[in-house]
Amino acid sequence: MIRSIIAVGLAAIGLHAGTASAQNLVVNGSFETNTLGSGNYRDMLVGSSDLPGWTIIGPSGTHISQVDRNYAGNAGYTFPAQDGLLWVDLAGYSDNAADGVQQTVATMIGASYDFNFYLGNVSGGAFGTQSLVNVVLNGVSFSCVNTTQTQNLTWQPCGRSFVATSATTTFSISNGDPTSDYSSAIDNVVLQLSATQPGGVPEPATWASIIVGFGAMGGVLRRRKRDAMALA
C-alpha cells in the first residue's frame, strides 16, 4: 500500500512539475483586462491605476496609451496586436516621454525564470525608424530594439533568463525612443519558471505534491499501528 502511495505521489510530482513551469506569473500580461472599442485607443496617466495589474511609471503628467488592433488613425498604417486584441504604446499618443510599465511578482529565491515580451515597430514619418525599450529585471538593466522597416506594426521577441534573488521580483519596461518618435509598442509579457531548474530547487507544485504524499503515507502508518494494537 505504501509503495502504491509513493508511486501516485511521484506521478503527481511529475505532472505538476510539467504544468507549473508554463504558468505566467504576470498579471494582465497581454493588456486585455480593460474593455476598449474596436479601432479605439485610450491614454493612461503615469501613476494612475488605469492599467490593471500594472504600475504606470514615468515623468509626472505624461501618458502611455492602450491601443486596439483595429486602430486606423493613420492612413496607410496597420496596428495589429501580437496577442489578443490590445497592446500598449509606451510613447503615448503624443507625449513621447520615457514612460513605462512596472510589476512585481512572487518568486522563489534560487529558482530560474524566463522573462519574455514582444516589441513592436512601425516606421516612417512621425514613427521614426525603430522602437527601443529599456528593461530593468531583477535589478539588472538591458535594452531591446526593433528596427523592422514597415508601415505595418511588426513584432519581435525580447527577453532573458534570470535566477531570483528575492521572494519577489520587480521588472519594468520603459520607452527609450527619442521624443520625435510616436510609437513604442509592447505586448504579451510573460514571466514563468524555466523548464530547467538549478539543482535542488523544486517548484511550488512539487512541494505541494510531496507534502500531500507524505501526509497520505502517515495516515496509512497510523491506521496500521491502531490495527496492530487492537489485535494485541
Image (cartoon, rainbow, N blue to C red):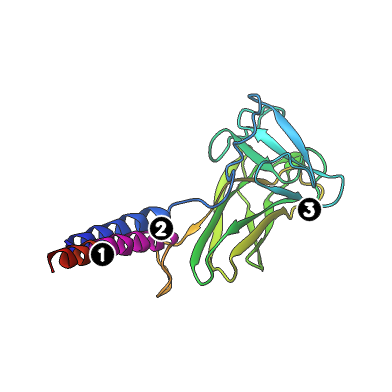
Disc nearer the start of the sequence (2/1)? 2
The vertical placement of 69 against 183, above or below, is: above
Image-based side of 164 in relation to 4, left or right = right
Q: Amino acid at mark 1?
A: Arg
- The secondary element bearing badge 2 is classed as helix
Label 1 Cα neighbours within 10 Å, binned few <14 / some 14-19 / many ≥20 = few
Image-based side of 19 in relation to 223, left or right = right
- The secondary element bearing badge 1 is classed as helix
Residue identifier under label 1: 222
Quarter-of-image position of residue 176: bottom right
Q: Amino acid at mark 3?
A: Ala
Image coordinates of residue 66 in percent, x first then y, are 69, 37
Residue depicted at 73% across the width and 51% down the height: 100
Residue depicted at 65% across the width and 33% down the height: 34
Residue identifier under label 3: 98
Q: In the rendered view of the protein, which quadrant contains the N terminus? A: bottom left
User: Overall secondary structure of the magenta stretch?
Assistant: helix
Circle on res. 59: none
Of residue 117 and residue 8, the one placed in the foreground of this image is 8
Residue depicted at 41% across the width and 67% down the height: 202
Q: Residue furthest left?
A: 231
Residue identifier under label 2: 205
Q: CA distance from mark 3 to mark 1?
A: 63 Å
Q: Amino acid at mark 2?
A: Ala
